[in-house]
Amino acid sequence: MDPVKILHCADLHIENESKRNSQLVQNHYSDLLKGLRQIIKLANEEAVDILLIAGDLFDATAVDPVTLNSVKESLSGCHASIFISPGNHDYVSIESPYSDEDWPANTFVFKKEWESFELPRLNTVVWGAAFRSTHVEESLFTGMEGLDPGKINLCCMHGDLVSNTAESSYHPITPDQISRLGVDYLALGHIHKRTEVQKSASTTYAYSGNPVGRGFDELGPRGVYLGSVGKERVDLDFYPIAERQYLWEEIDVSGLFTEREILSTIRKTLEERHGGEWQAHYYRLVFIGEKSENQLVSWTSIKDQLSDEVAYIEIRDRTFLSIDQESAAEENTLRGAFIRNAQADLNNEQDEAEKEKIQRALKYGLEALSGGLRLDEN
């Protein structure tokens, strides 16, 4: 029996088009729609037979007509058979776009608690279920009956993988359930961080993660799983989709005294880490290292200049101030008195743990006295 070629994705969370005059918001909306088009393009280029979308294609049950039409047009251009298992964000309801009758002919949406769709040409059955409200606290696998072991069986499902004794409001899926399922591949959605492809008894399963990052809590490459599923073997590889990534980068600015030096170091570092397309991404830059008292650099100016070069930029200052404590201790100032008192405490303290606390207090105190302590960076 020949294997089938599949593409597994989930959790695009396509949002409604926003009227807000924000470049980041507009970029984000564009990224999501482009992500779907990239998935369809990849499926066509790789001659995929079946595209599995394991829930939360949309971020809400109400979708504006312009966005919905764009999604349907993209799906209609796919050469594969498409199966959508609605999740907790885009669950099936009266107002849901899944209630429409004009979905492309190649697209099947699971609307019940359990359904199957047979593809005789591929000797394959695709199983799936739909969220019908935001919360599903009981297993949906109980309705799965009549599985034919002579066919390739795929399952597309949105849910929360938990331990055998745990609970979840987002369709709890346990290892025991997976081991008894008997399908050849279980395509999971809901968790935005992809897992490795795993196996329990005869069932191979994985979360593909979301194909497009949506914030700095979803860092790095995002994509889909693509490959072949057969009765004896499952071979799936990760394919990056998102052209723009959310990236959290540390930049050491020790020994740099001018904006020009710092900007040059940033550009060089980001290009080394992310190649010629480094300017396409969203960055949160964290400046670390030692700065001297005569380093007069405006982080606001640096951010403004970088904003013209990259898709989006945030800056966090985590540098620490380098002070000649011996010279500063001789000052007839509040800072000098603070250092002298701290040094006396260190000399009198025997406990190493307490000494570490005093050292930290000295560090933060000097930062505060120099105007460098950041009480609230948000």
Image: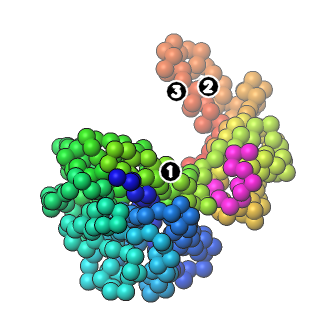
Label 2: element kind: helix
Of the residues under marks 1 and 2, which one precedes in the sequence? 1
* Magenta segment includes 279: yes
The tag on residue 58 is none
In the rendered view, tell whether residue 281 sits above or below residue 326. Answer: below
- Residue 59 shows in the view: no
- Of labels 1 and 2, the one closer to you: 1
Q: Nearer the viewer, residue 299 or 105?
A: 105
Identify the residue at horizontal 23%, vertical 49% (top origin).
Answer: 182
Read off the residue under disc 2.
Answer: 341
Q: Is 142 situated left or right of 215 in this image?
A: left
Report crowding for label 1: few under 14, some 14 to 19, many 20 or more residues within 10 A (C-alpha).
Answer: some
Of helix, strand and loop, which mostly describes the magenta segment?
helix
Task: State which region is magenta.
Answer: 272-283
Q: Please state, as top left, top right, bottom left or bottom right, where the C terminus lies in the image.
A: bottom right
Report crowding for label 3: few under 14, some 14 to 19, many 20 or more residues within 10 A (C-alpha).
Answer: few
Read off the residue under disc 3.
Answer: 357
Q: Nearer the viewer, residue 280 or 121?
A: 121
Q: Nearer the viewer, residue 76 or 252?
A: 76
Read off the residue under disc 1.
Answer: 238
Alpha-carbon distance for marks 1 and 3? Answer: 46 Å
Q: Amino acid at mark 3?
A: Lys
Q: Position of residue 228 (x, y in %)?
A: 43, 52
In the rendered view, tell whether residue 324 sits above or below residue 31. Answer: above
Of the residues under marks 2 and 3, which one precedes in the sequence? 2
Of the residues under marks 1 and 3, which one precedes in the sequence? 1
Identify the residue at horizontal 53%, vertical 54% (top origin).
Answer: 239
Alpha-carbon distance for marks 2 and 3? Answer: 14 Å
* Magenta segment includes 193: no
